[in-house]
Amino acid sequence: MPVQLLKEIEDEVTNLLTDLICINTTNPPGNETLAAKYLTEKLSQDGFKCELLESAPERGSVITRLRGTGEKSSLLLLSHLDVVSANPKEWSVDPFGGVVKDGFVWGRGALDMKGMTAIEVMVMKLLKRNGVELKGDVILAATADEEQGGLAGVDYLLRNYPEKIFAPYILNEGGGLAIPTQNGNVFTVQTAEKGILWFKVTAKGTPGHGSMPNVADNAIIRMNKVIEKLDNYRSQVSLVPTVKTFLTEMAQEDATLKELFTHLLANPELSDEILNEVAETAPQLAEEVRPRLRMTITPTIIRGGVKENIIPSECETVFDCRILPGQISAQAIALIKTLLDEVDSEKLVFESLQAQEPSESKAETPLYAVIAAVLRDFEPNCGVTPMLATGGTDSRFFRSKGSVCYGFQPMYPELSSGEVVKREHGIDERISIENLVFGASVLYETVKNFMS
Ligand SMILES: [Zn+2]
């Protein structure tokens, strides 16, 4: 039977999402237990037995499971229940009102990632209602605390209840959005993510009167050199497997990119110049590729000085450094310290604030093959490509334990990826009802085919 969109679940999946948006799970503080209880109730209507596990009061995650025969490995449908804050004054609708308007569900979490929670809950319900025979267990986990690093969510669950949540295969957030090309849509599957290294540099100096600049030793001037040094630093370009395949696939789908991307693949050391050329016709794509080729270091917070007429003896800056799969944070720290020594080895203090290692799953797996086949059932001429995310997700916890994790919430490109990036954690976040139905339809077929 040919695949079709599950039009009949449109209202149900939309209501799941609007209800979830109305439960304010802004993290901090999170308060995910309210949302976990809501899902427990919704799932129990179809006979699911759910477990609500709290890492601390009100920091709840919910887990449930559909048993298979055990002939195949289990698959986890993962999502997080918390969201980042939203300032209602900046939005054109109430971010926690669950507003449905112009064919879209509006609100904080619509894209990141209560939309996918609603889709995954819908998939579980459909598998059960339709009596799908599963050869492996399908687990659903909607968890706390992803937006603050996951320690009170996935990390807690993996440490304390691995038997309940661990699975060799995982579908999570971070990919799925199609990129429109000359040959049609190319759907992305997030197979890798960069690592995060947050660090602080403190520049020391000698205080003095603001009217006598040469007598004192201004820490702000020293920090200026540090920022310039780190901002000008260009690490060596490295094409990790995910990015190599991404560039190859995109070259195949788009004749205008073919020559430039082929050139880049053969000459990664020329990537800056080549991407400048790409930017002439596809500026958005060029800027999306750039940070995926090397480590980046960005200053994000600066503090220094207390009074108009005092030369400060201290200035500190926080940097957000992102490293590629294959690198480890310890190597990046060593390299940054060397760069700082070149500025001033005496009066600079380095402090590591947080490190999350990068992670990568290979695309040559049975799950990836099923995803690609199902997408082509829905859209025969579409392309499918693995993708490296510049940000981190909970997938890294599972990848470090050997699971194959893919970020895959299939979406038509109704908003460009630039728009989606702006809406996630930004203002007027929203997802179309069409994409909710499409996402649920594709994920349902994917799980059904992978597990049969
Ligand atoms: Zn998220």
Image: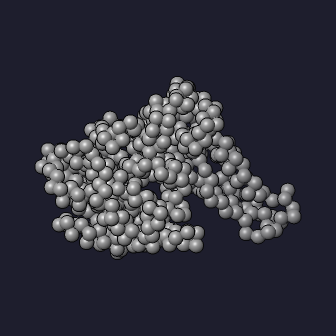
* Residue at 19% over, 52% down: 137
Between 401 and 74, the one lying in front of the other is: 74
* Residue 182 seen in render: yes
**In screen coordinates, is 247 left or right of 51?**
right
Q: Where is residue 23 shown, x and y percent of the image?
A: 39, 73
Q: Which residue is most to the left?
A: 69
- What residue lies at 46% left-to-right and 66% top-to-bottom? 101
Task: Give the colouring mode of the picture.
Answer: one colour
Q: Is residue 100 left or right of residue 227?
A: left
Left or right, residue 449 beside residue 389: left
Q: Please identify the quarter of the rendering in which residue 17 is found.
A: bottom left
Question: Which quadrant does the C terminus fall into?
Answer: top left
On the image, which quarter does residue 57 sit in? bottom left
Q: Extreme right residue here?
A: 211
Task: Judge whether residue 67 can be spotted in this image.
Answer: no
Picture coordinates of residue 16 (x, y %)?
Answer: 33, 66
Quadrant containing the N terminus in the rendered view: top left
- Does residue 129 lie above or below 188 as drawn? below
Rendered image quadrant of residue 326 = top left
Which one is nearer the viewer's eye here, 176 or 129? 129
Q: Is residue 139 above or below residue 449?
A: below
* 110, 60: nearer the viewer: 110
Which residue is painted at 45% across and 73% down in the image? 97
Residue 221 location in percent, x, y?
75, 54
Taking the spot 47% from the left edge, 48% from the top edge, the residue there is 413
Q: Give x and y (percent) for residue 146.
A: 41, 60
